[in-house]
Amino acid sequence: MSAKAITPEDLRSLIIAELSLGHLSENEQDQIIGELGRVLLDRATLEVMKLVPSEAFEVVDELIDKEMYADAQELIQKHVPNMETVMMEAVRAGIEEHKQRVNSSEKE
């Protein structure tokens, strides 16, 4: 069974739901999601890559340099079979961290 990465649609839906952005215009949602989404995906990618052994990481890096993305993903999944779970946990943790920062800045 192959794990799937978080799709942009999944990420968008999650951010809108978790941050209660449904009342905003699509343009306003896009702006927030664009900025926060990149940070969350970077965070998720970092968490996954932390689980890849260094020798395999070097091979993944070479595959990406050669634009062999499917092979790179297959190698990552070999070392991180629960990749989707790791990514979702990182995204959810990032959203929670964002909520806490927003709440604490509103209190100041």
Image: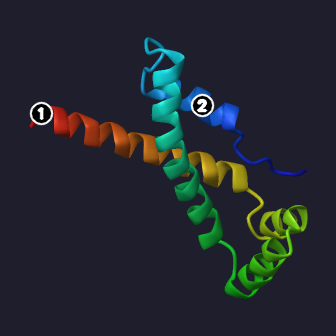
Count of marks overlaid on the render: 2
**Residue appearing at x 68%, y 85% in the figure:** 54
Is 40 situated above or below 71?
A: above
Which of 27/43 is in front?
27
Which of 78/97 is in front?
97
- Badge 1 or badge 2: first in the primary sequence: 2
Q: CA distance from mark 1 to mark 2?
A: 27 Å
Helix, strand or loop status at disc 1: helix
**Residue appearing at x 69%, y 74% in the figure:** 52
The quarter of the picture where the C terminus appears is top left
Residue at the disc numbered 1 = 107
In the drawing, what numbered circle is on residue 6?
Answer: none
In the drawing, what numbered circle is on residue 12?
Answer: 2
Is 60 positioned to the left or the right of 95 in the image? right
The disc labelled 1 sits on which kind of residue?
Lys
Residue at the farthest left position: 108
The disc labelled 2 sits on which kind of residue?
Arg
